[in-house]
Image (cartoon, helix red, strand yellow):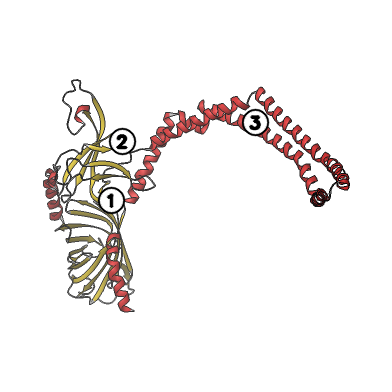
Amino acid sequence: MLAALVGAFVVWRLVDERASTGEGYRVYAYLENAHGLITKSRVTVAGLPVGTIDAIRLETVRVRDLPCEPNEEIDEDEYVTLARVDLNIQSGVSLYQDATVSRRSASLLGEFILALHPGTPGGTALGEGDRICHVVATSDTSDLIADLGAVAGSVRRIAEQVERTFGTDEGGRQMQSALRNLTEALEAVNRTVQANEAVVNHTLENIDSITTNAEPELARILSNIEAVTRDMRTIIEHNRDGLDEGVGEVGPTIASINRASHQLERVLEDVGEITERTAAGEGTIGRLTSDDHLIDEVEEAVEGINRFVGGLARLRTVVGLRSEYLFLANAFKNYIEIRLMPGEDRYFLIQLIDDPRGRTQFTTTQVRTSPPRDGDPPFYEEVRATTSETLLFSLQLAKRLYFFTFRFGILESSGGLGVDLHFFDDRLEINADLFRFGDQTFPSLRVRFQYEIVRTLFVLGGVDNILNADPSVPSQNGADFFLGAMLRFDDRDLVGLLPFLGGLAGGLN
């Protein structure tokens, strides 16, 4: 372990001096607004991740250097401070001189990413250290707040106009005069309807007199008219109650209109008061539209929520199922592990282990014999080893530095630490674990080699408990050799495995 740690430190120093020689290439862009962007945020092309944000910092540049082709005809040097965003782009992705970059929202909760358009193939390709000079501007929360302030101003102007129209004494008198005229007109209509009954009766009497002296043709015509008027009178008499009820409801309707107008006046007065208080900066809405400090606090809170949600959105869950056959113990040791990865260089490891050898505990008992046997001491110590088959668990924090991963925490229900070495794009892993301090003569040291033969499927082998070789009880305390296999997959791998699992389930049915 000491040699491994010394070697890790030496390699880390060597790699740290040549950190710029990793895969891919770096480009950068100047943004007027980098709100919501953090390091390690995704960089996408057509919705697919092609890199990450490496660094974000402020930088002062000349205005005439911002276009893709600097304008050298400008004599005066004008400077502006912008956000410089450095991007790590995968080596297989090509960007060209007319490539564009824009800040996009990745979720409803505020996570932001950078979206790239690679440009026109065949043009000048961007290389290490080049700049993406075409930036597409996007809106932000401050723009929405400004729009809200404009809407509030419009509402205030409308309320002022309504107040000028109806809020004065003259406007109130005009409204009352109009309602009074409407009432009088309805009363006149009512009187006219009531007077029509006598007029109709008088007209029918005149028609009856004419038909007595008229010619037969006129008599027939008038008789027809009489029949029609008779029907009309019947209809009116049958519906007199409904007509009277309708006329009686006109008065209460006008009264309701009058009450509604008074209520409208009071509502408009309240609206005017609210708009005046808002314009003066009173109340929550007034403070929000006029207090810059409060707006800054709201923006900081939203930015904190964005960072938290962005961390949750980047959280990957990796599930591992591993089984090892112990040759000397003639049994299988099984693992279920979950890795919670908030970033590519760190994760939390949770394991549940079924160990057939169980967990061994040692107890020391002092025994007194009275009287002692000849030649035996009166006191002696008795050490008992108790092995129980129980489920073990691990809870570790892992941090990766280049091709080394260091782990520490609880390992198989005891304190422990470990180191992992990764080779060939992480297909080959060498693991070393040191744990169970004080339970045995020496701590348990386990070395394991595992290799990914196909995606998500590993074969593995190694030696367990190397430092405690006990030939008398090899199956419990001594070193043991093992071979096994492991499945390790995340959400994307699980999608790829679903067709095979569906076919396997169909074959079993």
The label nearer to you, 3 versus 1, is 3
In the drawing, does residue 451 fall left or right of residue 253?
left
Residue 88 in view, yes or no: yes
Residue pointed to by mark 3? 265
Task: Residue 252 in the image: state x and y as whole percent.
Answer: 75, 40
Helix, strand or loop at disc 1?
loop
| Amino acid marked by disc 3 | Glu
In the drawing, does residue 411 fall left or right of residue 120?
right
Question: Residues under labels 1 and 2: Cα distance?
Answer: 21 Å
Task: Residue 413 in the image: state x and y as whole percent.
Answer: 31, 62
Q: Residues within 10 Å of mark 2 (few under 14, many from 20)?
A: some
| Amino acid marked by disc 1 | Gly
Pick whichever, 107 or 209, lies toward us: 209
Task: Residue 84 in the image: state x and y as whole percent.
Answer: 23, 36
Residue at coordinates 73% horizontally, 30% vertically from top-left? 181
Q: Quarter of the image holding residue 18?
A: top left
Residue pointed to by mark 1? 47
Question: Residues under labels 3 and 1: Cα distance?
Answer: 55 Å
The label nearer to you, 3 versus 2, is 3
In the drawing, does residue 7 fall left or right of residue 361?
left
81 is higher (above) or lower (below) than 90: above
- The residue lying furthest to the top in this view is 76
The label nearer to you, 1 versus 2, is 1
User: Of label 3 and label 1, which has the lower sequence position?
Assistant: 1
Helix, strand or loop at disc 3?
helix
